[in-house]
Amino acid sequence: MGKSHDCRTEITLIAPDITVGWILLGTSTGRTNHFIMLTSLQYYRHFLAAIFAIEEINSNQNILPNVTLGFHIHDSWANERKAISSTFSMLTGSSDYVPNYKCTQNRIPSAFIGHLLSSVSNVMYQITSIYGFPQVSYGAVDPAFSDRIRFPLFYRTVPSETAQYQVIIQLIKAFNWNWVGMISSDDETHQKASEEMKTEIIKNGICVAFLVQIGERDGSSLRFALQAIRQANASVVIVYSRTVIFLFCLIYLYNLSTNVVWLMLSPLASASGELYNNEFNGSLVIFFCQGNIPGLKDFLYKADPSRFPKDPFTAAVWLEVFGCHSAQAFPKSPSRSYRLCNANDTLKRLEHYGYDVNYFRLTYSMYIAVYAGAHALHAMYTDKTSGGTILHPDKTTNGLMPTQIYCVGNIQFTSRFSEIPVSRCSASCLPGYRKTFVKGKHVCCYECVQCSEGEISPLPDMDNCMRCPEDQWSNESRDKCIMRAIDFLSYKDLFGVALTTTALVLSCFTSAVFCIFLKYKKSPIVKANNQELSYLLLLSLMLSFLCSLLFIGRPTKVTCLLRQTSFGIIFAICISSILGKTITVIIAFTATRPGSRLRNYVGTRVPKYILLLCTLPEVFICALWLIISPPFPDYDTHSATGKIILQCNEGSPSAFYIMVGYIALLAFVSFFVAYLARKLPDIFNEAQYITFSMLLFCSVWISFILAYVSTTGKYLAAVEIFAILVSSAGLLGLIFIPKCYFIFFKPPVSTRGHLI
């Protein structure tokens, strides 16, 4: 049931380019011309969808009751200048317009529906907004239109380009591409959009090999674009151009399409995938998701010049597509080559050429744009009758109808490519390698360098290598961290076994000498060299051999605390005992002189005091060391590749050097005193042996200090063990072996009679 028409209002539509495409057809035939023809028919379908929506609204009692919605359509030729002229014509009511003058009262536009292009929509808005007319666009995706301060009367039924950029970026990342080219039209809309898109792509770590802007039917710019594709070696090219048809024609002629994946953006990709030649199969299309328009298919099939006798657009389409004309549009044939249209001349004939009337994307955007304007008018009239104010569309969605989302489509993607094409400036860096960038080149053009030791890159194309934790090391391929080999001077090592065996043998040998001295304690040779000090020296040497075992095995808190302090105190006792023995000899020989005061110091008390006074400072140094900065178990990850060396951290290196320095001072004093007493006339005078033993002792420990500062790891402990064993063995051999020789091999010499 129709509605009564008490009043009439009008919506003005600015079509993008309904008729200009037909000029390109000429008289040639072929698949390329079909492509051009069908693409232009997409714009004509938008025109028919708008008429279909208006007829639906006029027959619907729930929208604009008692109001007839009229329309007026202008073809902008996709040209900003033509759009301005058309806008002024509609505002003034005359093609010979004068701005701000109105030539008719019959046509009162309420809203403008336009345009597909952002640039045309913008110039239209600059004029219509002055007079307070809203504009609803069905294809303008410029994100600037989302600014409600600058464009308070602009609405659209498509999402902005910002969402489109993210779709493109996610798509490129999904295929692991980082080297893409871009081709856009040279008009203001596409120039601005392509620059913004390029910026967003670069922000996401993707390199743009080139951005070429081409002019419509400009063969030189098209050839320049093809040259850029070849030189850049980019396998993926983003096409955002209204001249996409001409670009593809030239690409087809140069046989370039077989090596390139074309990433086409809406609204240019609004045509069905059936329109593309097989040479472009595998290319990706980003378009608005489809919407359902019930009844539009039949409406399109019924469209012909006889149904729209006063429509010049329909007459021009039928004249160029079917080569026929209607009697109403052209009473006289415009040319002998044209015939009168018949019932078979409908758009249904174009189905086998790929003309799709089942999937509507931009057509659906046009459809809901008309409905958005109608709903706004309905809300305005309803509010006026209730005495309220005009209702404005929802500013958060830029329109009354829900916005669409983007979909990604492809045309038989596997028909041309056996695998996903690679589009990278440089080959992907394998795990274990990192990128190194070349100065003056894109960040995507890099070289691959293997990670250093101790670093890994578990993933491909990493900018920097990751350092392994302290207890781990990189494997040979540098893509995984593995546990370090734990290294220390172990009892199981061949070196450790040799040192342990040597220490035990020397300790046993010292015990044997001690037993010999106990057995022959009444021997004059034993008594003549301060028997008690000899026993104490032998016990100290035995402990010094055994304390070297503290340096072997896995370091623990106890062994770290004991080994250096034990070594220091034991050696202080050894050197103090030797010093006491030497001073005793000097006192004994000096006291025999007449009137000597040293006779009062002859006995066992002086050596004991010397021993105590010389040992206590070393005990004090070690105690202070343990209190202030004690040694502790530690590990070294820097000295050996791929190993973690367990060792004892001395805590305070200064304390260690002071301890060793004090022992060296005692040894130097003992050497000096023994050197002075070396020629005293006595058969049992051991000053010469002590002199040589101290000389050996000092040489060993001077060499140890030099080796200590240049050795790391378990060999540091081995060097100290070696110094302890050699110096202790030197004291044992040079001081006690001659006495054992006299006891066993020259017993007459050790008798009392021989002494007297």
Image (cartoon, rainbow, N blue to C red):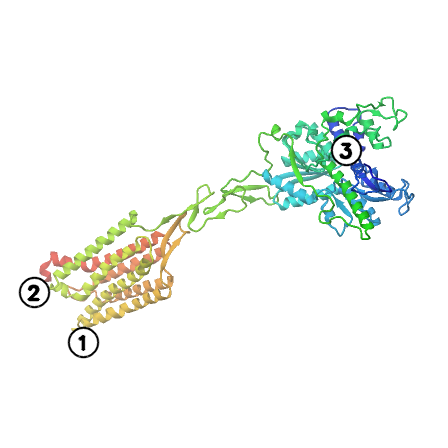
- The alpha-carbon separation of the residues under discs 2 and 1 comes to 27 Å
Q: Which residue is mark 3?
A: 45
Residue depth check, mark 3 versus mark 1: number of the one nearer the observer? 3
Question: What kind of residue is marked 3?
Answer: Arg
Residue 651, image x and y in percent? 38, 61
Mark sitting earlier along the chain (3/2): 3
Q: Name above or below for residue 698 compared with residue 490.
A: below
Residue at the outermost right position: 103
The residue shown at (89%, 48%) is 100
Query: From mark 3 to mark 1, how far is it between C-alphas?
Result: 133 Å
- Confirm whether residue 695 shows in the render: yes
Cβ atoms at labels 2 and 1 below 8 Å apart: no
Image disc number at residue 600:
1
3D distance between C-alphas at marks 3 and 2 = 141 Å
Q: Nearer the viewer, mark 2 or mark 1?
A: 1
Q: Percent x, y for residue 370?
A: 78, 40
Element on which disc 1 rests? helix
Q: Position of residue 246 (x, y in %)?
A: 74, 32
Residues tagged 3 and 2 counted as in contact (Cβ below 8 A): no
| Residues at discs 3 and 1 in contact (Cβ within 8 Å) | no
Q: Residue furthest front?
A: 1
Please say if 170 is above or below 701: above
Whether residue 449 sits left or right of residue 241 in the image: it is left
Residue at 24% in and 59% down: 543
Viewport quadrant of the N terminus: top right
For the residue pair 3 and 448, the one nearer the viewer reads as 3
